[in-house]
Image (cartoon, rainbow, N blue to C red):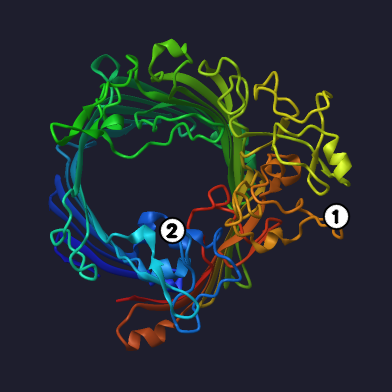
């Protein structure tokens, strides 16, 4: 709803969204409420004030099985197909540590999360003289989250209704409560001068920014509830309740400036500069200067192009260089080829203040004077040179428009260098007696291109309007250009001169045809069991008569070789928009033309860890004496030798997916005017309806690298839009 009076206008809205979970036994319900309010007032010719307010309230009611990583998490790996959901008497089937996951969903208790995320921004725009404006805005955000999970013991029964035991993972009864309060505020102030002098255009901006966040988490865990069906942390018989808390804060401050100059709409220059400081680093490493600049040449405005105006209406060449800092500190841990080196970790004292040596505290497992002793650990080593990571980008591009702007698009070529990445430090002798602290000791480099092409036109006496857009981009593998933390060039770590995402593995030569053939090869480095016909035969690349991984270094990886890389290549998007009379149609298709995917989880391998790792349907084409041309090797419980990374099982993860398809109809204006409405439109929208891929349907193309991610659903929605 929008309106106003005089110089003041407002816009307000209220949204509601509800979605039920996929698993019926979980009875999960997610709800979201989103009220918003925007008010703007031109108080005077030189003064404008505005206020934006929004709230997002969410409620998520799900089984408490999520707190013990059971229930729904077992559906893809641990649910035996021969076990019924219910026994004949109506009780859930299954018993023991790994019971019926649907029973855990239904009976384990509830995990209820309620969150309020409130944002408000006040804005003042002052225009004291011509060509000069001053903008000041202040934002405050309050995020409050209350989450309570209750674990309830439940009985397990045999097929004849006989009581067997109490399910162990929710016994004794307990309540876990987490209360989070996160306050954030930001101040932005900037002044802009804009003017034109003949053929000269000038725009200058200077500004100031500051941010502050204060995070508080309080948690309690109590056991032995007096009434498990009415979970409350204050009603219990727990002699040792657990209480914890985290409180952190951070601050950012910065200044920025930008200068734009255009001469005769032909030659363009832009220069930017930032100077930022963060509380996450010590004072002598706290600030970072980030320059950037770009130039452009509007070739189509030159006199020698005048004869092509009807055909080539725009041709602009561009070049730019820029640097941006990153102060979000990654979680500290062992590195591997798949680590996203720029991924920030959750708020904690070790990550908000990474330059401060923190001493961990806790309780020891023995008594002192009749009480459990308190422990204070020695602090970890800290690097004295923590500082910003820097992303440097060079870009060369062009924009074009042809045939009276019917055809337009752009092309860009870019080179990206990420420097001073925070990674585990250089390996040091074990006599150090402590883990090596992380340091800004790695650089990576990538390059690529992207282009877009759009055609828009009208047909059938201008009744049919259509627009077609194609975008395609490709980025090279990311090459590590500096890293001294892996002097042995271990292939499970970053390697200077090699690409992130490299997959090293064995060459698959099929299956052993006989037990004697398998026994003749030494595969003991891969698995100590007796190798038999139907096990995978790996190629002996180094010719030593053994199949092994050497010492897993680049110079000695045994019989391994580089067999793939997980970097996606040739990402594309396609948009089609049509409108004919009162009908409209839109679709969006996206995909990847080349990507290697190495599956290494329960879904791909049958009985991967043990007999409880229930195979999926896709694994049923396995080797037997009567099925020697199978896709999978012979069935083994924990057959690790057959589950080595290998070229046969590097899958093609290329795909094309219809992300959105919408058909709408707008009622004729003659009808809507009769009911005092400007416009009424009805529509139907489908999401993720069709996918083209060679991957098994057990995998979702967009989340294949992380099988634990909630899958993307096909959906069909109907809607009505009314304009008053």
Q: Position of residue 354 (x, y in %)?
A: 30, 25
Mark 1 lies on residue: 629
Residue at 34% over, 77% down: 678
Q: Position of residue 660 (x, y in %)?
A: 54, 64
Q: Position of residue 433 (x, y in %)?
A: 39, 15
Q: Nearer the viewer, residue 542 or 424?
A: 542
Residue at 83% over, 40% down: 518
Residue most toward the left?
Answer: 43
Mark 2 lies on residue: 70
Q: Nearer the viewer, residue 470 or 436?
A: 436
Number of other residues with Cα within 10 Å of mark 1, as a class: few under 14, some 14 to 19, many 20 or more: some
The N terminus, quarter of image: bottom left
The C terminus, quarter of image: bottom left
Observer able to see residue 640: yes
Distance from the alpha carbon under mark 1 to that under mark 2: 37 Å
User: Looking at the image, is 680 positioned above or below residue 289?
Assistant: below
From the viewer's perspective, tell me whether residue 422 is left or right of residue 288: right
From the viewer's perspective, tell me whether residue 113 is left or right of residue 565: left
Residue at 62% over, 20% down: 497
Circle 2 sits in a helix, a strand or a loop, which is it?
Answer: loop
Using the rendered view, name the quadrant where residue 250 is placed.
top left
User: Looking at the image, is 306 positioned above or below residue 282?
Assistant: below
């Amino acid at each position: 709803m929008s309106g106003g009076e005089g110089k003041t206008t407002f816009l307000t809205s209220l949204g509601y969204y509800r979605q039920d979970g996929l698993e019926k036994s979980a009875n999960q319900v997610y709800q979201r409420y989103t009220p918003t309010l925007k008010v703007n007032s031109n108080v005077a010719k030189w003064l404008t004030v505005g206020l934006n307010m929004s709230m997002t309230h969410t409620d998520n009611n799900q089984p408490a099985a999520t707190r013990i990583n059971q229930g729904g998490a077992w559906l893809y790996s641990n649910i035996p197909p021969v076990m019924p959901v219910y026994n004949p008497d109506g009780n859930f089937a299954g018993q023991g540590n790994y019971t019926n996951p649907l029973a855990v969903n239904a009976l384990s208790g509830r995990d209820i999360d309620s969150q309020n995320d409130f944002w408000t921004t006040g804005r003042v725009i002052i225009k004291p003289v011509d060509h000069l404006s001053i903008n000041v805005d202040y934002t405050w955000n309050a995020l409050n989250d209350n989450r309570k999970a209750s674990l309830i013991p439940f009985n397990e029964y045999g097929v004849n209704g006989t009581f067997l035991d109490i399910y162990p993972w929710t016994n004794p009864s307990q309540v876990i409560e987490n209360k989070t309060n996160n306050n954030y505020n930001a101040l932005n102030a900037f002044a802009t001068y804009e003017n034109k002098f003949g053929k000269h255009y000038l725009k200058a901006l200077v500004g100031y920014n500051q941010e502050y966040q204060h995070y508080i988490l309080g948690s309690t865990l109590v056991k032995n509830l007096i009434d498990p069906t009415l979970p409350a942390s204050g009603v219990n018989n727990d002699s040792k309740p657990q209480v914890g808390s985290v409180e952190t804060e951070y601050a950012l401050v910065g200044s920025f400036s930008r200068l734009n100059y255009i001469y005769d709409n032909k030659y363009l220059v832009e220069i930017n500069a930032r100077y930022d400081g963060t509380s996450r680093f010590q004072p002598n490493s706290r600030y970072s200067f980030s320059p950037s600049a770009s130039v452009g040449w509007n070739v189509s405005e030159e006199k020698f192009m005048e004869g092509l105006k009807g055909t080539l209406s725009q041709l602009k060449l561009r070049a730019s260089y820029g640097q941006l800092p990153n102060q979000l500190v990654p979680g500290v841990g062992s590195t591997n080829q798949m680590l996203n080196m720029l991924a920030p970790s959750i708020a904690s004292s070790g990550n908000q203040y990474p330059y401060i040596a923190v001493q961990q505290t806790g309780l020891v497992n023995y008594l002192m004077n009749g009480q459990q002793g308190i422990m204070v650990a020695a602090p970890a080593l800290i690097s004295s040179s923590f500082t910003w990571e820097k992303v440097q980008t060079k870009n060369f591009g062009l924009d074009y428009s042809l045939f009276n702007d019917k055809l337009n698009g752009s092309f860009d070529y870019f080179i990206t260098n990420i420097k001073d990445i925070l990674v585990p430090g250089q390996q040091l002798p074990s006599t150090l007696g402590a883990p090596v602290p992380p340091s800004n000791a790695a650089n990576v480099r990538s390059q690529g291109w992207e282009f877009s092409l759009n055609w828009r036109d009208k047909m059938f006496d201008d009744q049919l309007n259509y627009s077609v857009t194609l975008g395609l981009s490709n980025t090279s593998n990311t090459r590590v250009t500096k890293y001294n933390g892996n002097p042995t060039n271990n292939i499970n770590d970053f390697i200077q001169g090699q690409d992130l995402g490299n997959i090293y593995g064995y060459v698959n030569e099929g299956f052993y045809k006989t037990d004697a053939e398998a026994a003749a090869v030494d595969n003991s480095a891969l698995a100590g069991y007796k190798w038999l016909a139907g096990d995978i035969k790996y190629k002996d690349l180094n010719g030593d008569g053994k199949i092994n991984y050497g010492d897993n270094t680049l110079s000695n990886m045994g019989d391994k070789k580089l067999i793939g890389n997980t970097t996606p290549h040739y990402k594309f998007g396609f948009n089609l928009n049509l409108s004919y009379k009162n009908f409209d149609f839109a679709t969006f298709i996206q995909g990847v033309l080349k990507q290697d995917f190495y599956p290494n989880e329960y879904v791909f391998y049958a009985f991967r860890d043990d007999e409880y790792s229930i195979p999926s349907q896709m694994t049923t084409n396995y080797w037997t004496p009567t099925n020697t041309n199978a896709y999978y090797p012979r069935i083994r419980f924990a057959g690790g030798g057959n589950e080595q990374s290998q070229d046969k099982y590097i899958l093609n993860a290329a795909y094309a997916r219809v992300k959105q398809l919408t058909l709408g109809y707008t009622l004729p204006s003659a009808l809507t005017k009769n009911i005092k409405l400007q416009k009424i439109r009805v529509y139907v929208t489908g999401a993720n309806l069709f996918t083209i891929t060679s991957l098994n349907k057990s995998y979702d193309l967009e989340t294949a690298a992380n099988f634990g991610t909630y899958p993307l659903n096909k959906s069909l929605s109907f809607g009505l839009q009314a304009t008053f």
